Structures are given as structure tokens and as C-alpha cells.
Image (tube, rainbow, N blue to C red):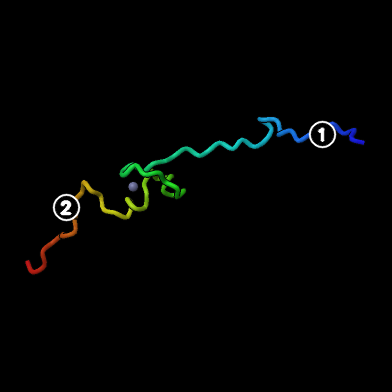
Amino acid sequence: MSDQPRSSEPPIPGTAVERRPAPVVRCRRCHRPLRNPESRWEELGRHCADAPAPTRVYAIDQDRLPGT
Ligand SMILES: [Zn+2]
């Protein structure tokens, strides 16, 4: 009995699938860590993607004045 040399050893490192943690991607505007894959891809959080650009204050909305 107890002839098996098996013990509770952890698997040899390198053989198992290497699980490296995903790098922290931060929003390029507010530099908040992004968790959403789509946001990480664009490096832009949805909170900033939906928000208007802070630099472009003047929105180009008015094209022509009606009545002229
Ligand atoms: Zn942001």
C-alpha cells in the first residue's frame, strides 16, 4: 500500500496555462482604470466617450440661420 509516489505537488510552472494579469488600461481623459473591454480597446471610458469633449466647447450645431 501507499506505493504511489504521488504527492500533492503543484504542477510544474510552465506547463500550465500562464495566467498573466491583464495590464491596467486607463482612460486617456480621466485616467481611470477601465474594466470594459470595449473601453479598454479604445482607451476611453464610456463616461468620457458619452461626455462631450472638454476642449471643444463650441459645438458646431448651428449651420445656417433660418429666415435669411
Ligand atoms: Zn474617462
Give the farthest residue toward the bottom: 67
Q: Pointer 1: what residue? A: 6
Query: Which of 5 and 58 lies nearest the eye of the viewer?
Result: 5
Dot 2 crowding, Cα within 10 Å, few <14, some 14–19, many 20+: few
Q: Nearer the viewer, mark 1 or mark 2?
A: 1
Q: Residue at the spot x=32%, y=55% of the render?
A: 50
| Residue type highlighted by circle 2 | Tyr
How far across and how far down the image is residue 59, in percent? 19, 55
Q: Do the CB atoms of the residues marked 1 and 2 lie less than 8 Å apart?
A: no
Q: Residue at the spot x=69%, y=32% of the render?
A: 15
Task: Relative to 62, say whether 1 is above or below.
Answer: above
Q: Secondary structure at mark 1?
A: loop
| Residue type highlighted by circle 1 | Arg
Dot 1 crowding, Cα within 10 Å, few <14, some 14–19, many 20+: few
Res 7 quadrant in image: top right
Give the farthest residue toward the front: 1
- The N terminus sits in image quarter: top right
Q: Secondary structure at mark 2?
A: loop
Q: Residue at the spot x=13%, y=61% of the render?
A: 64
Q: Pointer 2: what residue? A: 58
C-alpha distance separating marks 1 and 2: 72 Å
- Taking the image as shown, residue 65 lies to the left or right of residue 38, namely left
Q: Residue at the spot x=16%, y=52% of the render?
A: 58
How far across and how far down the image is residue 65, in percent? 10, 64
User: Disc 1 or 2, which lies upstream in sequence?
Assistant: 1
* Residue labelled 1 has its Cβ within 8 Å of some atom of ligand 1: no
Give the farthest residue toward the right: 1
